[in-house]
Image (cartoon, rainbow, N blue to C red):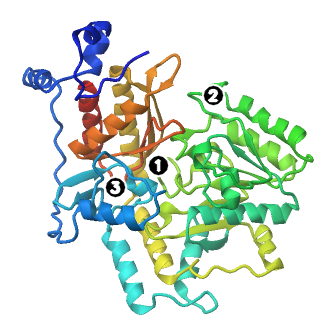
Amino acid sequence: MRRFIPATAVLSEKTKHSLPLRRWRWRCFSQVAQKEFDNKGGVVVPKMPSFDYAPPPYTGPSAAEILSKRKEYLSPAMFYLYNKPLNVVDGKMQYLFDEKGRKYLDAFGGIATVCCGHCHPHVVDAIVNQTKRLQHSTILYLNHAIADLAEALANKLPGNLKVVFFTNSGTEANELAIMMARLYTGCHDIISLRNAYHGNAAGTMGATAQSNWKFNVIQSGVHHAINPDPYRGVFGSEGEKYAKDIQDLIQFGTSGNIAGFVSEAIQGVGGIIELAPGYLPAAYNIIKKAGGLCIADEVQGGFARTGSHFWGFENHGVVPDIVTMAKGIGNGIPLGAVITTPEIAEVLTRRNYFNTFGGNPVCTAAGLAVLNVIEKEKLQDNAFVVGSYLKERLIALKDKHDLIGDVRGRGLMLGVELVTDHELKTPAKLETLHVLDQMKEIGVLVGKGGFYGNVFRITPPLCFSKEDADFLVDAMNYTMSKM
């Protein structure tokens, strides 16, 4: 088992000699040793790509002042990254800026949310222009913004998926989708996957399957199937073998008929886990035989992020009955949606169902601008080209550093899992925090996820360039080379 020695640790001679020589050189460093290593032509601090933008001077409160107010007035449940929390005051495309004007490469994208780029001029113009004309009314009146976005979204989906209901978030979208499945089928049981995350409200918390995100409240009618995880799963990449567990759950945990099945194509919060090949087609087939609906959660994987396709589920060759989305749909504007068939959508007419802010004209104007930018700037193509290049570089880095256990994902939705033992796949929790923090000091921001908190989530804006990809990988390599 490897031992992580922080950069600032002072070790006794006995401790030094107790560590294998190769691992000691790899896991530990000092400022003097690193300086000598750099001067000999080894790994040097990578250089940030040039970018023609300088933010205006910041005159607001300092990070310390904000943190003090946050501790006093905001929920203690709100956590933050890094030993020294980052005060972000400006953003432009794939870059963020702190209070002192320092630039950071944003490889997290506000948790897979900023797809066009921070403050993209076309999206900003759409928001400002609509706000000047009409900020809010109600869907009880007519307005073209909501209808235009609904039409544009329907044209992006296959089959008869053409009826849209707008929400404010992904959690709300998944809540509505689950309720619609239950109403349409007349059944209550839902199947989701272990390690899944679908939200934190009453119904979605039930579908979520990580104890980290579940409170001890009533969560009924949800069964969690074995996760088809190619890296940690019992059947590796043999997707159809995992699907048999769904059949077992239906036969031995339900009446034999179910309401539906909900899954992401790539689990985001769960650690960028792409479902094993062949799993979704087999799972959908079993669900349909049991009378259930198939719900595709595209909150993180949708809107061209995977590069090869616009929606994550398309990578698996399936067509769901309901699709949920949020995050990338608004490039940071609070907006979500549920899209389904006319027949399924009809269930909401049995009673009154209303959403005050769902379909707000400012939000839907932003959503339409996002779709236009993705198309005009060929961001799906860029996600594929740059994402493939970045993944190749990360795989090469894995061959260099034993700390990297797995590199996975598609397009610009990539994960790097850190382990201290390749055979046991022991999560490298402390090492992950250390690398995360040191990369920030170099100027690269990545996310962290997975049940054990040992996976880097790389979900940058889709305008990310190959130069940005090089800087990210070089920063990770530099940090790991110093350990």
Say which of marks 2 and 1 sits in front: 2
Amino acid type, residue under disc 1 in the picture: Gly
The mark nearer the N terminus, 2 or 1, is 2
Q: Position of residue 15 (x, y in %)?
A: 29, 12
10 Å crowding of disc 3: few (<14), some (14-19), many (20+): many
- Residue corresponding to mark 1: 307
**Is 383 in front, or is 251?**
251
- Residue at figure coordinates x 50%, y 47% from the top left: 308
> Element at badge 3?
loop
Q: Is residue 98 above or below residue 5?
A: below
Q: Quadrant of the N terminus?
A: top left
The numbered dot on residue 463 is 3
The residue sitting at the front extreme is 72
> Element at badge 2?
loop
The mark nearer the N terminus, 3 or 1, is 1
> Element at badge 1?
loop
